[in-house]
Amino acid sequence: ELFFIDQANYFLNFPRKVRNQVYSCLLRLRPPTQGYLGSRSPQEMLRASGLTQFPWVLQDYVSPALDLNNPAVFRDLSKPIGVVNPKHAQLVREKYESFEDPAGTIDKFHYGTHYSNAAGVMHYLIRTEPFTSLHVQLQSGRFDCSDRQFHSVAAAWQTRLESPADVKELIPEFFYFPDFLENQNGFDLGCLQLSNEKVGDVVLPPWASSPEDFIQQHRRALESEYVSAHLHEWIDLIFGYKQRGPAAEEALNVFYYCTYEGAVDLDHVADERERKALEGIISNFGQTPCQLLKEPHPARLSAEEAAYRLERLDTNSPSIFQHLDQLKAFFAEVVSDRVPLVLAVVPHRQPHSFITQGSPDLLVTVSANGLLGTHSWLPYDRNIRNYFSFSKDPTIGNPKMQRLLSGPWVPGNAVSGQVLAVAPDGKLLFSGGHWDGSLRVTALPRGKLLNQLSRHLDVVTCLALDTCGIYLISGSRDATCMVWRLLQQGGLSVGLAPKPVQVLYGHEAAVSCVAISTELDMAVSGSEDGTVIIHTVRRGQFVAALQPPGATLPGPVSHLALGSEGQIVVQSSTQERPGAQVSYSLHLYSVNGRLRASLPLAEQPTALVVTEDFVLLGTAQCALHILHLHKLLPAAPPLPMKVPIRSVAVTKERSHILVGLEDGKLIVVGAGQPSEVRSGQFARKLWRPSRRISQVSSGETEYNPGEAH
């Protein structure tokens, strides 16, 4: 219900990035590993898992390659899963028409089982705790017969084609969680009767090379044009007008009466045994979701129609990740005295008044000497050749008006981006790296010091904020991490709680980098000795310790980043022997800490960001790399810069990449200039405020680095 119904008539037309946020919400509903349960018991997780179902979207599980442009590979979403094989329609209809209950209490139904229930969830997640233990408990202390277990994706689909009684749909894990397809714990699941083959990992279709590849292709199928054009038909069956009544009868979509909302009033059942029996049926047999729609759900816009609508919106900036073949860089001079720019970020949840539409955002910069800048940033879409306007903070160039972050800093160390974080609403700047070990809070844009908290026993070496603006995590040379709650007043950030919510232990060396996700209840930290540790946020529980692969002398973990689905990207360094050259590498871990990919790096990384399905990597060798998140493979040729990169950030619209350089310049990377833009278009936009047009004076110079130093 979470995935398909959120303002039901509009959700299917939401952008993909919004739907990805819902995917990550599903991770909260059902955390996938034993010991990583957050505040939910296994029973609570199971109840939550029974409330979400996804459709079988494919029917081709035998071809060597999956062609998503071929409608024949997709399942007919207009039919219930029980009659997706047309041969079963007559059998199901006859069963319905011939059913009679002598007592007159049970209505006619097409199916005696349900498409979403606790047993079905345990069937699919038999290899993943705590569902393994719950499955064994359900089967009276043993595993079910091997042939009835989920051992092959193709076999599971074939069962749906052969038996109208098995009407299980899919669960969300089929679209985001590859671990459930592997028997990582080595459970003895027995052998198949016909082939005597031992049941281990789930047998994947020939078109999937690995569990990760299966998940990615399955997700692409769900997001494909065919499914987008027909998904509303499935929603009509599950949540809509075909769920009950004559329309459901005609669609062969009637289930056992106890599964429907309001079918049984347990409070009026006097007999204790009868009430418990009904509770057991409702709890274990399955429940049909609330009927949310009484009329047909509209079809989703096609990609062509959606693109046409977006083109007509003058306020919409194109996502840079949809135009990676058209990247162009422009520079905006922030600091003129060649002081490195260690932070440049546009906070992604800045409040705006609906009365003053088009008002610019705040772009915050911090230089290595602590110089604070608050600039005006306004992305455009069609009328400016670089899609944005940037107005420099006038105080930066005036020594009498400059705002400097309060020091002193650790002797011998300049300010670095690792010890800085900006609140999502742009009201506060948090800083570490101070000689007294304090964590300091500075008001933006005034630059006034509001508070300093001294809880760590040594210097704070790194900071990170979650995307929700709820928690801040700090790491220190005292080998601990602390989780702090942001204080809000009137919906705006006003400071930090005086005491940390959690103190996280486990490192034996100074903490060098941190990352946090409130949505996924994950706090991840890396240390100088090359160790990565995962904790939960709400309870502060230790989950796992990771040791990135490499040589015998691991170096520090210099950068960490978390993906929206819990992917952990780690940048580490190693040496073969003392005094040898340092080698750098990038590693990708799953939400459960399983190594998925590694990439040796020929350059020294200086900045790391994960956004959507991409990894952005800035290096000391003057290059910006854009990689695919799921395989760590290049998504575009490296963008050269003239000098080393010190910071990388992505704007909230995903329209630009902000790159801070060693020489103090701010480089803005965008998707280039569309061919339809003409310089004379400004005259035809007279209804626009003149202030917005006059702002187009900064940042128009294209950045041509030539040969990088």
Image (spheres, rainbow, N blue to C red):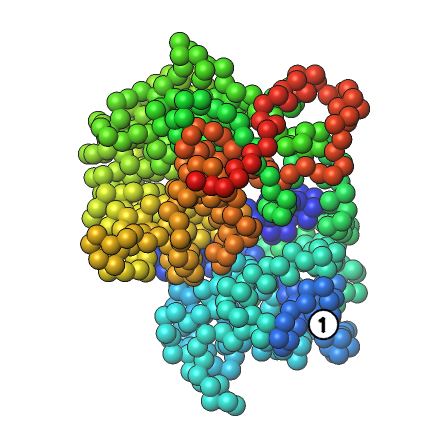
Q: Position of residue 8 (x, y in %)?
A: 68, 46
Q: Amino acid at mark 1?
A: Val
Relative to 656, 11 lies left or right = right
Name the quadrant of the C terminus.
top left
Q: Is residue 195 above or below residue 707?
A: below
Using the rendered view, name the quadrant where residue 358 is placed: top right
Relative to 314, 662 lies left or right = left
Residue at x 47%, y 37% (from the top left corner): 642
Can residue 630 be seen by looking at this rendering?
no
Q: Viewer-proximal residue, 440 or 691?
A: 691
Residue at x 67%, y 77% (from the top left corner): 161
Relative to 696, 36 lies left or right = left
Q: Viewer-proximal residue, 190 or 390?
A: 390
Q: Residues within 10 Å of mark 1 (few under 14, many from 20)?
A: many
Q: Position of residue 134 (x, y in %)?
A: 41, 67
Q: Position of residue 260 (x, y in %)?
A: 64, 58
Can residue 460 be seen by looking at this rendering?
yes
Indicate the secondary structure of the residue bearing disc 1.
helix
Q: Is residue 635 above or below residue 79?
A: above
Residue at x 73%, y 21% (from the top left corner): 688
Q: Is residue 243 above or below residue 166?
A: above
Q: Is residue 427 above or below residue 483?
A: above
Residue at x 59%, y 29% (from the top left corner): 701
Q: Position of residue 391 (x, y in %)?
A: 56, 21
Q: Viewer-proximal residue, 294 or 473?
A: 473
Which residue is disc 1 drawn over?
Answer: 83
